[in-house]
Image (cartoon, rainbow, N blue to C red):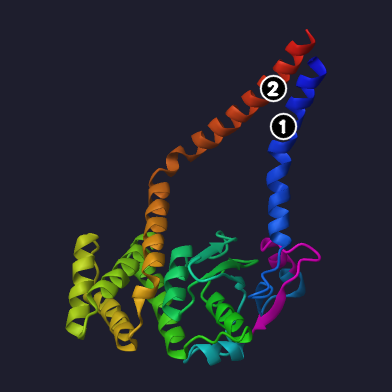
């Protein structure tokens, strides 16, 4: 009886620790035959050593199957008008396309190295560009603003045969520039900026403004609702940006659910940041509970033998 009980306990413990890893490995090795392999696009400024570091950051072990490309200065001026082909490009991205309805997920896997752009800023810009159903992982081996990652994402769609609209890509880049500028120059928290942009898009989808004046009214209402103060110049930046979106007739109704999900994600991030003072205690409580659970397990084994 004792031997059977011990065997059962050991089996449960092994299953608890091993099974999730096995499931993750199987999922990682599975290839989506509809969309093909994930696409990784490296910034051309990376050295060979930095490229290896990025591969490690993206979780690309030796033998991992991906399609690899490099984003160059020529790509930069091809996808985004007015940019400098001599710009240094370190940001890299891995794109895994998903079926319709799965939504867009952006993960900055090196948050300490992407200094200006957040997950939600990337998500907002990519939805504007037309990227709707994918998992996008962004990495850099050194501290950079993060803007050039958009070029790599655009190239990934280009080489896959799913071309994005050129003008929408340019507006998406402008949106990212406006977002980071507002965060830097106006002193507004990055997540608050993302929330503002998302809420304006949702309102545009709902109201379908026909004139620039209606766009201006939506912007002013959202600034007031979210209690955000901007200079006249920064307000005009927002109005001009969303007027361009209106003139492109981007159908945000198609991504309404993703905008709603993005709003929830931003709100959760803001809440976490506000409550970050308790983070250390949460970590301490977790490990205390883990140690107690292990101690209880071995105590039960000892009792069986006693």
Q: Which residue is mark 2?
A: 297
How crowded pointer 1 is (Cα within 10 Å; few <14, some 14-19, many 20+) is rated as: few
Does 248 sit above or below residue 38? below
Image quadrant of residue 211?
bottom left
**Residue in the picture at 38% in, 74% down:** 254
Q: How many marks?
A: 2
Does 84 sit above or below residue 147? below
Residue 251 point in image, percent of width and height: 35, 80
Position of the C terminus by quadrant: top right
**Residue in the picture at 82% in, 19% down:** 3
Q: Are marks 1 and 2 in contact (CB under 8 Å)?
A: yes
How crowded pointer 2 is (Cα within 10 Å; few <14, some 14-19, many 20+) is rated as: some
Left or right side of 260 for 57: right
Position of the N terminus by quadrant: top right
**Residue in the picture at 56% in, 87% down:** 76
Left or right side of 302 for 261: left
Q: Is residue 189 visible?
A: no
Going from N to C along the chain, the mark reached first, 1 or 2, is: 1
The alpha-carbon separation of the residues under discs 1 and 2 comes to 9 Å
Left or right side of 96 for 275: left
For mark 1, give the secondary structure. Answer: helix
Residue 19 point in image, percent of width and height: 71, 43
Q: Which residues are magenta?
A: 52-72
Tell me, yes or no, whether the highlighted magenta stretch contains residue 170: no
Q: Which residue is mark 1?
A: 13
Image quadrant of residue 99?
bottom right
Tell me, yes or no, whether the highlighted magenta stretch contains residue 61: yes
Q: Is residue 104 visible?
A: yes
């Amino acid at each position: 009886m004792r031997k059977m009980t011990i065997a059962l306990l050991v089996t449960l413990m092994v299953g608890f620790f091993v099974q999730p890893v096995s499931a993750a490995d199987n999922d990682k090795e599975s290839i989506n035959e509809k969309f093909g392999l994930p696409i990784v696009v490296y910034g051309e400024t990376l050295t060979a050593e930095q490229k290896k570091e990025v591969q490690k950051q993206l979780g690309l072990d030796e033998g991992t199957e991906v399609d690899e490309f490099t984003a160059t200065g020529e790509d930069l001026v091809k996808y985004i008008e007015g940019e400098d082909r001599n710009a240094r490009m370190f940001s890299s991205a891995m794109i895994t396309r998903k079926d319709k309805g799965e939504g867009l997920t952006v993960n900055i896997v090196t948050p300490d190295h992407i200094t200006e752009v957040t997950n939600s800023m990337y998500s907002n810009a990519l939805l504007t560009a037309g990227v709707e159903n994918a998992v996008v992982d962004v990495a850099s081996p050194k501290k950079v603003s993060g803007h050039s990652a958009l070029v790599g994402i655009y190239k990934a769609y280009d080489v896959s045969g799913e071309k994005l609209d050129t003008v929408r890509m340019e507006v998406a880049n402008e949106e990212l520039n406006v977002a980071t500028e507002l965060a830097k120059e106006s002193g507004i928290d990055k997540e608050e900026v993302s929330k503002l942009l998302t809420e304006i898009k949702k309102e545009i989808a709902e109201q379908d403004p026909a004139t620039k004046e209606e766009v201006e009214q939506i912007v002013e209402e959202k600034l007031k609702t979210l209690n955000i103060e901007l200079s006249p110049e920064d307000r005009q930046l927002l109005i001009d940006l969303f007027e361009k979106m209106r003139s492109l007739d981007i159908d945000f109704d198609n991504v309404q659910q993703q905008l709603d999900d993005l709003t929830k994600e931003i709100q959760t991030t803001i809440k976490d940041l506000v409550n970050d003072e308790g983070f250390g205690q949460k970590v301490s409580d977790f490990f205390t509970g883990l140690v107690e659970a292990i101690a209880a397990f071995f105590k039960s084994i000892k009792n069986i033998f006693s």
